[in-house]
Amino acid sequence: MTKTSNEYLQSFIEFLQIEKQYSNYTIEYYQYDIEEFLKFTNEQSIEDLKDVEYSDARLYLTALHEKQLSRSTIARRVSSLRSFFRFLSREQVITENPFLLVQQQKGAKKLPSFFYEEEMEELFAVCEGEEPLQIRNKAILELLYATGIRVSECTGIELTHIDFDLSVLLVKGKGNKERYVPFGSFAHEAIERYIATARHFLMKSADSHSFLFVNHRGRPLTPRGIRHILTKLIEKASLTRKIHPHMLRHTFATHLLNNGADLRTVQELLGHDHLSSTQVYTHVTKEHLRKTYVIHHPRA
């Protein structure tokens, strides 16, 4: 019996979870993008995914532009659908991928946002306090800034992943790839203090587990939980900008390069497979140098 479109979508989600081992956060985007396309196919009276053609894909791209979505959002939608139909082709549901030849026009690459060092100091200042949650929040902020790890990687840290003697952290990244990342004295002190004075207090009402960061009920923190904590810290520090999950990761990379770190080392610390993913930060640092020059040079 032929599956429905939603059943094919569910099979694809299971593929991403089990075979690709993508994070829940990434899978949510895939699911949303594909569900939006399925709404479009219903509007176009396309009842079977086998009937989707290249012309339909082009029409959908036009519809996205008419909604005035950003280039990055449209590119992500096309990429999600290309992967979905590639999966359907692999499963022999379809014979040709209608999104294979769809190209989204590339615009200027948006430079990643980051915090200046003065802004980081303001964030650390609002974390100060003796309450268990304040101690935890400072440990989270110190670790994210010290290591540049992803928020999803931060929530996966277990107590046994931390080597305090060497100040090194075992990180499990995308596709369950492992890497070791060093952390400095500030993060070392903040994490030790959190484990010694706050974590056991927060764990009182929860079953025992080995995850490092927990919520007020003692349960493992989720990526959404950490994003909420960071947003509250921004509000408390009265910084006039919005924070997104990767912002501290961008800050980590930018500050390293601004202070003379080489690109290959930053690539390894970030866990990037390709140097091109890291090179975007060189544009950030060049822009930072240019602005500094214009402000301070008498003949700029």
Image (cartoon, helix red, strand yellow):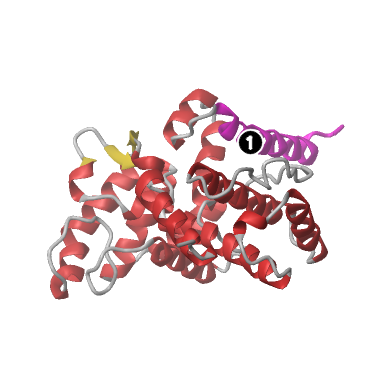
Q: In the image, residue 219 lies at what x, y percent?
A: 24, 68
Residue at 56% x, 46% y is 83
Quarter of the picture holding the N terminus: bottom left
Report if residue 258 is visible in the image.
no
Residue tagged 1: 280
Nearer to the camera, 42 or 214 = 42
Report the front residue among 21 and 240. Answer: 21
Give the residue furthest to the front.
Answer: 1
* Quadrant of the rendered image containing residue 298: top right
- Binning the other alpha carbons within 10 Å of mark 1 as few (below 14), some (14 to 19) or many (20 upward) gives some
Of residues 81 and 225, the one nearer the viewer is 81
Q: Residue at x 33, y 42 (%)?
A: 172
x and y, in percent, of residue 53 in the image: 72, 52
Image quarter of residue 51: bottom right
Left or right: where 287 falls relative to 269 = right
Residue 300 placed where, x, y %? 85, 34
Image position of 281 (left or right of 297): left
Q: Is 288 contained in the magenta span?
A: yes
- For the residue pair 13 and 144, the one nearer the viewer reads as 13
Q: Amino acid at mark 1?
A: Val
Against 89, is 197 above or below? below
Q: Position of residue 88 (x, y in %)?
A: 53, 49
Give the side of residue 99 with respect to residue 35, left or right.
right
Q: Is residue 291 magenta?
A: yes
SS category of the residue bearing label 1: helix
**Residue numbers of the magenta segment:** 275-300
Q: At x 15% / y 65%, what residue is drawn?
A: 200
Residue 299, compared with residue 233, is above or below; it is above
Residue located 48% across and 34% down the image: 272
Q: Is residue 135 visible?
A: yes
